[in-house]
Amino acid sequence: MIEVRNISKTLKGNQVLKDISYIFENGKIYGIYGYNGCGKTMFLRSIAGLLILDQGQVIIDGKELNKDVSFPESTGIVIEHMELLPNYTALENLKILSKIKKTASDDDMKKALEKVGLQPDSLQKVKKFSLGMKQRLNIAQAIFEGQKILLLDEPTNAIDEKGIELIYNLLRSLKNQGATIIIASHHKEDLNELCDVTIKIEKGMIVNE
């Protein structure tokens, strides 16, 4: 469970998060929507431990971020402007990332790539990938270690319609396994068919659920 308590953040004189409180339950998909610049990406960053808050707390499974832990355990992230290593293949990228935690096997990595529609044995370098292929790889890196929390910012950006359905089915499967999934998008319509709960953020505040 993720509990957000009265969090606020100001950047360059602009209050991007304003006293937000919310509880995210396990085994559900949450959709956060709003116009560009409304605060949804900053909200995801705060849950990921990538933002030092001015006030408030983020508590994940009883542990407070930036106090008990600096990064939420078992969390996969797709945040804007992510870049993987361009001169390596998709599988090589995951192998390099796997050295941090040392919990994923080669089979785990290959299965993650297959689940997002990439060929695990391809020798194509990431620098030759289309934008949609890069986004698929970003999702693969978020799931290959069996993460229980997924924080996804515009996860289907640049992915074709067939690929979107593949990703949606993958996320539904992970939800059924108990994962907590939070997706940010500026298209509410994209979230309606996938999410159990949709949350509107406007000017750094939750205004509708």
Image: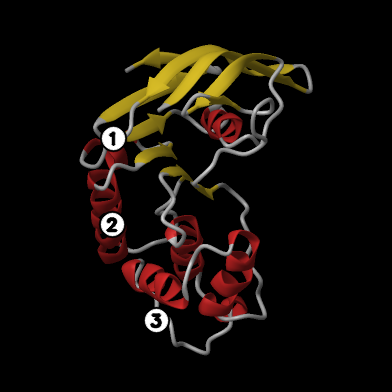
Q: Are marks 1 and 3 in contact (CB under 8 Å)?
A: no
What type is the residue that disc 1 sits on? Lys
Q: Is residue 134 above or below residue 2?
A: below
What distance separates the C-alpha of mark 1 from that of mark 2?
13 Å
What type is the residue that disc 3 sits on? Gln
- Is residue 89 left or right of 133 when viewed as pictured? right
What type is the residue that disc 2 sits on? Leu
Determine which residue is flagged by label 3: 119
- Is residue 109 left or right of 204 when viewed as pictured? left
Image quadrant in which the N terminus is located: top left
As drawn, the label of residue 140 is none
What distance separates the C-alpha of mark 2 from that of mark 3?
16 Å
Q: Are marks 1 and 2 in contact (CB under 8 Å)?
A: no
Element type at mark 1:
loop
Q: Position of residue 106 (x, y in %)?
A: 46, 77
Q: Is residue 34 above or below residue 140?
A: above
Looking at the image, which is closer to me, 44 or 70?
70
- Is residue 95 left or right of 174 when viewed as pictured? right
Q: Quadrant of residue 94?
A: bottom right
Residue located 56% across and 81% down the image: 89
Looking at the image, which is closer to me, 157 or 18?
18
N-terminal-most mark, 1 or 3: 1
Element type at mark 3:
loop
N-terminal-most mark, 1 or 2: 1
Determine which residue is flagged by label 1: 28
Q: Position of residue 129 (x, y in %)?
A: 53, 76
Determine which residue is flagged by label 2: 170
Element type at mark 2:
helix
Q: Is residue 182 above or below residue 205?
A: below
